[in-house]
Image: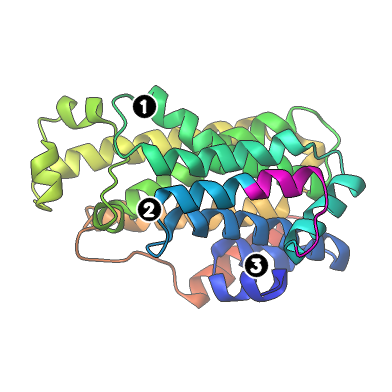
Amino acid sequence: MNATKITRASKSNLALAFVSLGPEQRRDITTFYAFCRVIDDIADSADLDAEEKQRRLDKWREWLRASEPGESEIASGVRELMKRYPIRPEMLEEIITGVEMDLRIQRYVTFDELRLYCYRVASAVGLVSIEIFGYRNPACKEYAIELGLALQTTNIIRDVGKDLQAGRIYLPQEDLARFGYSEKELRDRQYNDRFVQLMEFEAGRARQFFSRAGQVLPKEDRKSMVAAEIMASIYRGLLRRMELDKFRVFEKEYKLNKLEKAGRITGQLLKLL
């Protein structure tokens, strides 16, 4: 499957944000997104054992450095990106290292530990993306980091129930202890006041990251970051929906409908006028 088909099949909010880009940027960010999607799918596959997942991720590391007969079309596409943009192999390897954490870590004791994971699987993606979007002020890198943390912490809130099915708990154990909500209660999907308080705490953390991202986004780069701002707007709306509904993540799959997403995309585009 090529990059465009992978992107379309994902039905991702990120893919929606691509509508704001020109043809070349859209092509290149689609290639990069397909790389991220393939890497993530390896780690999440229920059909592969841990050894095979590691072997495939190692092969991707090799492909980032040199071409090989029979390699993935996406691998050659990503190497072309590294020729056109200041994207180093280490930047892409950071993302691979992030998904590798899912192969060996199923619990996080502290948020500091979780933050490293979020940085690798989301902020590192943002740091590559802004090279494709183009920016003038180096402070834009801090924007990419903060927005990545905001998006990933929102994902973690949304996917609590889904992650439990895979045996993973991303909510830090120190946070569960803070609100007297046990891991057993979480595994049993017990919805009570303590759980709601825990999730409100996590949502507050996500909002802080969104706020910091908005504060550090350089004025001169607001236009070039419109795709990222579309993502931010959609995810802020998603977070707000979960908050208003008291985080019924065990029984619901939260998402914005097409009209709501279109409205947020339009809102961000109108800010450029």
- Note whether residue 67 is visible: yes
Q: Residue at x 66, y 57 (%)?
A: 35
- State how far apart marks 1 and 2 are (Cα): 22 Å
The residue indicated by pointer 3 is 266
Q: Is residue 174 above or below residue 51?
A: above
Q: Residue 19, position in %: x, y?
A: 72, 68
- State how far apart marks 3 and 2 are (Cα): 19 Å
For the record, the magenta segment spans: 59-70
Mark 1 burial class by Cα count in 10 Å: few <14, some 14-19, many 20+ = some
Give the mark toward the camera: 1 or 3. Answer: 1
Residue 193 sits inside the magenta stretch: no
The residue indicated by pointer 1 is 111
Q: Residue 211, position in %: x, y?
A: 52, 35
The residue indicated by pointer 2 is 240
Q: The residue tagged with tag 2: helix, strand or loop?
A: helix
Left/right placement of residue 61 relative to residue 131 reads: left
Left/right placement of residue 73 relative to residue 256 reads: right
Q: Quadrant of residue 177?
A: top left
* Circles 1, 2 touching at the beta carbon (< 8 Å): no
What is the total number of numbered labels drawn onto the structure image? 3
Q: Amino acid at mark 3?
A: Thr
Left/right placement of residue 24 relative to residue 227 reads: right
Q: Residue at x 33, y 54 (%)?
A: 159
Q: Quadrant of residue 252?
A: bottom left
Q: Residue 164, position in %: x, y?
A: 24, 52
